[in-house]
Amino acid sequence: MKRRQRASEEQDRRRHVYYGGDYNPEQWPRETWREDVALMREAGVNLVNVGIFSWSRIQPAEGEFDFAWLDEVLELLHEGGIGVNLATGTASPPPWAVHAYPEILPRDANGSVLGPGARQHFAPSSATYRRLATELVTALAARYADHPAVKMWHVDNELGCHLHHDYSEHAASAFRRWLRERYGSIDALNAAWGTAFWSQIYTDFEQILPPRLATYVINPAQVLDFKRYSSDALLSLFTLQRDIIRAAGATQAVTTNFMGAFPPADYWRWAQEMDVIADDSYPDPNDAESFRGAALARDLMRSLKPGTPWILMEQATNAVNWRETNAPKAPGQMAALSMQAVAHGADGIQFFQWRQSRRGVEKFHSAMVPQAGLDTRVWRDVVALGETLHSLPEESPLSHARIAIVFDWHSWWALEAGSHPVRLPYAEIVQRWYSALHRLHHSIDFVPPSGELAGYDVVLAPSLYLLDDAGAAKLNAFVEAGGTMLMTAYSDVVDEHDAFRDGGFLVTQRAALGVRLEEFGALVPPAASGASLSAGESEGTASATGPGENAAPFAWGAAPAGSGAGALPAGAGLGQYLAETIHPEGAEVLGRFTSGRLAGAPALTRHGHGAGIAYYVATVPDDAGMGALLGSVLAAAGIEAEVEAPEEVEFARRGATRTVINHGAAPAVVRVRDTGAEIRLDPFAWERWTVQA
């Protein structure tokens, strides 16, 4: 008991920042386990994720459990002062379960059965699968709810990663139940889905099927609701297991690992059910800009549960194994990306995995303990990172961001349905707007359409195609109260059922924007233009080889003298995807299209609404145009970045701590605006400093 107490006290002293990774002792002989614990202590590891894919080892047959090996592993870890994030193991049903109950297997949109041999081979709504999972989690929770090594619970793993949507009969039945609960009556569903179109009127919920492979495009409202249902079905697997853990008396935090801006799961909804947010992130070392995608994911994770630190639960120490080319990380890059997470609010840095596998699909995936051994750069970097993390003080996770980006899974889902004026890649466009702000070195939060906006000065709503009444009211209230909103093309087009509202487009935001939208004006998408770009030429500037315009140049100038503090510095950009025909109804025209079929027509407007300002840009600018426009809008709103630095340098604010990280391959110089200090950063180096409150 004394040894247990000493280990627990030591662990508590070192647990401010969690450090570790996935530990799979079942893949290794028992004699390796003690060596693992010793190496974990050397590296500063204080939390490992155990049991993620251990179902077949824990339960070799139905009704039969083997906990002896897991008892031993947990005891060894606890004696070593290392905490455990204990997984429920439900992510990969064992062969005996599939053999006995083949009906648990999912089906794709073609109706084909997706077989075992990989992982996540289960239909989320299968009653049999859920029964088997319940029995496993009940046994685990009963045994380990009060085990001193268990500091957290990890439900399943990357829910939905490989199986976004299941189209089995289990899903069909569950989808119907979900629809009954959502609509109450078949008449209400028919009205919401517009089933009078193409003779789709239902007379009973039992007639409704998932949107399986069909002769042509399926009703977009049905597809949208199926995506909503599928997100909820995956979430229900989390809540099912969490509630079992809680019922067993466990008081530790319960979580599961997210995957950044993951298409099938509405993480705004999921976050309400999580005690702590956890995320997996694998930026590509081959892509010099991939750190911006990682930054977006980190800001999104922090924004999902404001005021609560989150955990980077998976990343790679070096190369992964699942891309066409799996480049290694540059020296210092692993630590730089880890510190990026800390700077954006993380209090946990972990990896997949602790010891590199010798067999199986992921044997070429790097790990904390490499196959090449301890005399390696990776191991030295792992030890050094542990020392760095444990030297960090406790910090608030708040970003103090004055800028928020509206991110909406429902708009994303609705845009994926097809049958639009142009295929608009929602996530890519949001990433580009985020990257433009990131290059300008601003702190950025994300919000859902109906989220709290009162603490921000500027809200950016990019291509918010679907806007429900609650979200519309929030945006209007934000502007009326004195905020600045920039809304971009193809926003406020439909309601929550993917249906046009009475009165045309931009109906809910027309009063704030002072603009009426007549026509969307599709352009040939940049990737489909068929044009080759010359050196130094921006995407979208070349002429399309086929008919149709692929770019809509536009420009804006500084407002005339006497226009006041809202004047915008002059700028220009190339419009992509859409060149909308808009008509000011009270709005001031700041910019116009300069050539093409809309030459001279309004492209950028500004409108005073209440105490605030609402801008509308009637296209999707290219990257340079996004940067110029945002710089102008932020300057007019009185928002200045805290540092001056090259684009490859990232700035982040966490509580009173500022961080700059050089993600570039060359040294960089950062100037701190309020002090005039200069910071010199080598490639993949970082610097942190605190500011007075």
Image (cartoon, helix red, strand yellow):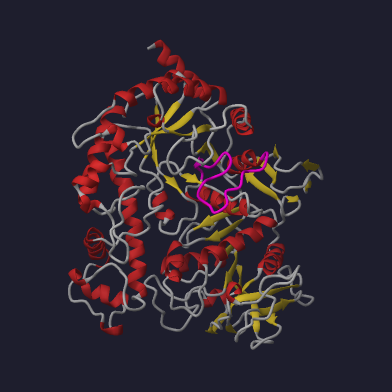
Q: Is residue 234 left or right of residue 689?
A: left
The residue shown at (41%, 57%) is: 266
Given residues 424 and 103, the one toward you in this image is 103
The quadrant the N terminus occupies is: top left
Is 676 one of the magenta-colored residues? no
Instruction: Count how many numbered circles sit on residues in the image.
Output: 0
The residue shown at (63%, 43%) is: 329
Given residues 174 and 558, the one toward you in this image is 174
Residue 644 rendering spot, x and y as whole percentages: 77, 52
**Above or below 541: residue 412:** above
Is 320 one of the magenta-colored residues? yes
Within the image, what quadrant is residue 539 found in?
Answer: bottom right
**Above or below 463: residue 271:** above
Within the image, what quadrant is residue 190 found in?
Answer: bottom left
Given residues 192 and 3, the one toward you in this image is 3
In magenta, the rendered stretch is 307-332
